């Protein structure tokens, strides 16, 4: 049986800074402009059925909220 948790699941990260693109467990995407990052984040979130959080630095975090 799957145990329910209250933690967010990290699915991905979208940034316009090449030095922030690191290998890891989630999807890491580089966008060349802030507009492209915003559009890319929303498109990927729709496909993955997850939520998008814009960080103060302008990057985007893709997370799944437990249901």
Image: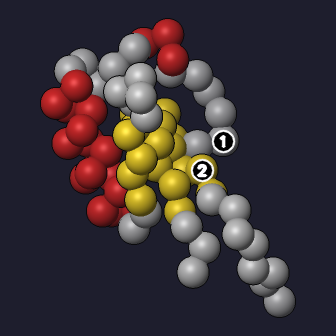
Residue bearing the label numbered 2: 10
Q: Residue farthest to the bottom? A: 1
Q: Which residue is drawn at 42% across and 12% down?
A: 18
Q: Which quadrant is home to the C terminus?
A: bottom right
Q: Which residue is drawn at 69% across and 62% down?
A: 7
Residue bearing the label numbered 1: 25
Residue 24 placement, left or right of 45: right
Q: Residue at x 24, y 19 (%)?
A: 32
Residue 29, visible in the rendered structure: no
Image height check: is 2 above or below 42? below
Number of residues whose C-alpha sits closer than 10 Å to that of mark 2, classed few (under 14), some (14–19) or many (20 or more): some
Q: Residue at x 63, y 57 (%)?
A: 9
Q: Residue 57 carries which label?
A: none
* Picture coordinates of residue 40, whole percent (x, y): 26, 42
* Circle 1 or circle 2, nearest the eye: 2
Disc 1 is placed on an element classified as loop
Q: Residue farthest to the top? A: 19
Q: Which quadrant is home to the N terminus?
A: bottom right
Residue 33 placement, left or right of 9: left
Residue 50 placement, left or right of 16: right
Disc 2 is placed on an element classified as strand
Which of pointers 1 and 2 lies earlier in the amino acid sequence? 2
């Amino acid at each position: 049986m799957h145990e329910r948790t209250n933690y967010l699941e990290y699915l991905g990260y979208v940034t316009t800074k090449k030095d922030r693109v690191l290998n890891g467990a989630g999807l890491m995407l580089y966008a060349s402009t802030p507009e492209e990052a915003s559009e890319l984040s929303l498109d990927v979130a729709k496909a993955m059925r997850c939520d998008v959080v814009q960080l103060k630095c302008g990057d985007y975090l893709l997370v799944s909220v437990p249901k």
